[in-house]
């Protein structure tokens, strides 16, 4: 069965984007390519239980097994040696990506304390949007009683938009609560 957000994108977002930006073809309309969820372990990189708990929580949130990321080079300021564990990450594409984005918009973001919308300045030069989340417990899949430690994560939504304004409009139309200005 097709994801609810994907169906919404096809039926509502594509026609609205074509009208607003005068695209002549449906294939010119930007779309979301992938979502990358990244969580660092920081000083707990030697603690096997902490790494295991981060892996378990990210897999619950994303529905996919995360990959352990390792340091590419030694950085003495961060007490990091080459090959040490830095964190975990997962890349979502296709149906899982739309399902995750739908859950994040409808269930997780409304649970953020004192939430007033997402920053409009979090786009990079490739029209990708990054959201920093301070607590993993905003996702309903994570049980507050079983977490090892409260930690944050970065969620990057990668689009194929040529301009940042196209990507911003795409994410707004999909339902991401991005602040004006």
Image (cartoon, helix red, strand yellow):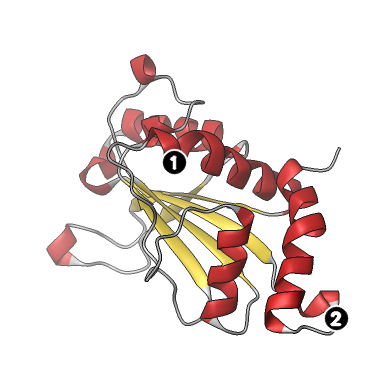
- Residue depicted at 47% across the width and 36% down the height: 108
Numbered badge on residue 11: none
Helix, strand or loop status at disc 1: helix
Which circle's residue, 1 or 2, is located before the other in the chain? Answer: 2
How far apart are the alpha carbons under marks 1 and 2? Answer: 33 Å
Q: Measured from the top left, where is residue 64 in percent x and y?
A: 62, 39
Q: Measured from the top left, where is residue 173 in percent x and y?
A: 62, 60
Residue under label 2: 25
Vertical relation: 50 (above or below) 162: above
- Residue depicted at 76% across the width and 76% down the height: 18
- The one of 44 and 14 positioned closer to us in this rendering: 14
Q: Is residue 29 visible?
A: no
Vertical relation: 94 (above or below) 20: above
Residue under label 1: 109
Q: Measured from the top left, where is residue 68 in percent x and y?
A: 47, 48
Q: Quadrant of the N terminus?
A: top right
- Horizontal placement of 2 versus 100: left or right? right
Q: Quadrant of the C terminus?
A: bottom left
- Horizontal placement of 121 versus 114: left or right? right
Vertical relation: 107 (above or below) 152: above
Residue lying farthest left?
Answer: 77
| Residues marked 1 and 2 touching at CB (< 8 Å) | no
Q: Quadrant of residue 49?
A: top left
Q: Measured from the top left, where is residue 130 in percent x and y?
A: 43, 62
Residue lying farthest top?
Answer: 145
- Horizontal placement of 81 versus 167: left or right? left
């Amino acid at each position: 069965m097709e994801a609810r957000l994907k169906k919404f994108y096809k039926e509502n977002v594509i026609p609205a984007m074509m009208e607003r930006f005068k695209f002549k073809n449906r294939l010119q309309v930007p779309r979301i390519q992938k979502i990358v969820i990244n969580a660092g372990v920081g000083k707990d990189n030697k603690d096997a239980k902490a790494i295991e708990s981060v892996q378990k929580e990210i897999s619950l949130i994303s529905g996919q097994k995360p990959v352990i990321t390792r340091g590419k080079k030694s950085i003495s300021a961060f007490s990091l040696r080459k090959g040490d564990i830095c964190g975990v990450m997962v890349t979502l594409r296709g149906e899982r990506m739309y399902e995750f984005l739908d859950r994040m918009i409808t269930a997780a973001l409304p649970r953020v304390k004192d939430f007033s919308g997402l920053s409009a300045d979090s786009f990079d030069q490739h029209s990708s949007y990054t959201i920093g989340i301070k607590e993993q417990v905003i996702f309903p899949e994570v049980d507050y009683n079983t977490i090892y430690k409260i930690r944050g994560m970065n969620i990057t939504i990668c689009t194929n938009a040529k301009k940042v304004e196209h990507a911003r409009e795409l994410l707004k139309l999909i339902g991401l609560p991005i602040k004006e200005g």
